[in-house]
Amino acid sequence: MPQLKLVAELKGHDDRVWQVSWDPSGTRLASCSGDKSARVWSAISGANFFASTAMEVDGSRSNLASTWQCVDVIDNAHKRTVRSVAFEPTRGRAIATASFDGTTAIWEKTDESADSYECVATLEGHENEAKCVAWAPSGQLLATCGRDKSVWIWESTGEGDFDCISVLMEHTQDVKMVLWHPKQELLASFSYDDTIRIWKEDDDDWVSASTISGHTSTVWAGAFSPEGEYLASVSDDRTVRVWMQNAVQENGSEEGFYYRPDTSYKCVAVVPDSVHSRAIYSVSWCASVAGEQSANTDLGFLATGSGDNSVRILSVSRKEATTADLDVALVCTQENAHGLSDINCVQWNPKYPGWLATSGDDGVIRIWHLEL
C-alpha cells in the first residue's frame, strides 16, 4: 500500500502558509504567508537530496529540520497577506507574489550566483485582494485574479516591465485561482461562482472560450495532467472532478481527417465527497513515479489537500487504452498532515516525481516522499 513519508520540515513563517511553488530545477521552493512575506528555501545538498531514496532519510525531528535552509526572506513589498507565489518556469530567476493589498510584485535574483531577490516591478490594477498569480510556460505571460471577480493577463516587455494586455470580467464572484495549460496557450480560472472558465487569445484579445460547470459550490483550484489532456478540479462540495479536453475533427488537405484540441471539456471522472469531509482547497497532478513501469493506461497521481487536515493521494488511469473514461482511486491517506490545521496547498515536484510539498495553517511547509 503506498504511503507518504515525511522527510523535511521548513519552519520560519509567523502565520499560515498559503502556497508553495517549486522552481524548474526542483531543488528550491518558494512559500508565501499571512505574515506578509515570501521565503525561498533550498535543499542544502541540492539535487542529492532527491537522489537518495526516502528510506535512507532519517525521520527524526532534528533531521527533518536540517536538510533544507531558508536562503532569502522577501518582506518589503506587500502591506497585507501574500496569498500566492510562483517561480518563473523557464529559468527560475524570477518570482511573482500576489497579495491581499491588491498588488502583484515581480522579484528577480540580484545576480546569477546569489539567492537574494529584489523587487523589479509592481503590478497594480485589482480593486482589492489579489488571490493568485501564475506564469505561462513560456515565461512571457502572467495571469492574476482576485476578489474583484476579474482575471488580468500581463505580458513581459523585458527589463522587468509588464503591460496589461487584457482584463477579463466574465466571472460573477471571486476568482480563486488561475492556471495555464502546459502545452497550449490556454488559461483556466476557478471561481466562487462554482464554475471554471477557459480563456484563449482571439484577434489580439483574450476571450472566454468555454465555461465548465458541474461543481455545486466554490471551485477552489485545479491542475492539468502533465500533457494537458485532462484537468482536475476541487471544490467546496468536497468532490474531485476530472475533465477531458474535447477534440474537433477537421479535414486535412493531404492526410485526410485529423483531430485538433478544442477548448471545451467533458467530465470523465468524479471522486465522491466521501474522500474528504471538508472543502478541498488544493490539487496537484504528477506523472508516474520514477522507477515504476508506466503502462499506456497510467496517468499518474493526484494529491489533494483539505480543510479536514488531511492529504489524499489518488491514482489515475484509463479504464482501457483506447477509452476516455478514467479510474480514479484512493491509494494513500495522510491524516493530520499539518496537525489540526487546514491544508492550503499541495504541490508535486516538477523534476522529481513522487516528492510532494504541502503547506498549512500551522505556518509550516512539509516535504513528503510517496513510497509505493
Image (cartoon, grey):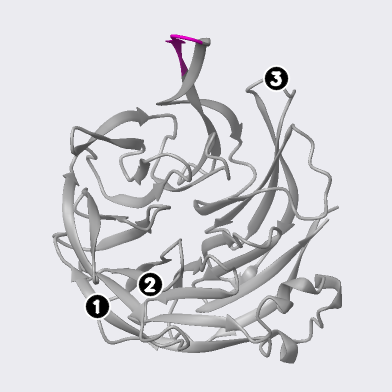
Q: Is residue 88 left or right of residue 344?
A: left
Task: Describe the element under mark 1 as helix, strand or loop.
Answer: strand
> Residue at the location (17% across, 62% down)?
128
Cβ–Cβ under 8 Å for marks 2 and 1 = yes
Q: Residues within 10 Å of mark 1 (few under 14, many from 20)?
A: some
Residue 146 covered by magenta stretch: no
N-terminal-most mark, 2 or 3: 2
Neighbourhood count class around disc 3 (C-alpha, 10 Å): few under 14, some 14–19, many 20 upward: few
**Residue on which the image places disc 1:** 120
Please state which of residues 46 and 234 is positioned toward the viewer in this rendering.
Answer: 46
- Distance from disc 2 to disc 1, alpha carbons, whole Å, reads 10 Å
Residue 212 pos. (x, y %) = 39, 30
Residue 33 appears left or right of 101: right
Q: CA distance from mark 3 to mark 1?
A: 49 Å
Q: Which residue is mark 2?
A: 94
Q: Quadrant of the C terminus?
A: bottom right
Would you identify the image quadrant in which residue 367 lies? Answer: bottom right
Tell me which residue sits at (68%, 85%) in the image. 45
The residue depicted at 52 percent of the width and 39 percent of the height is: 228
N-term-proximal mark, 3 vs 1: 1
Q: Is residue 250 magenta?
A: yes
The residues colored magenta run: 248-254
Residue linked to disc 3: 322
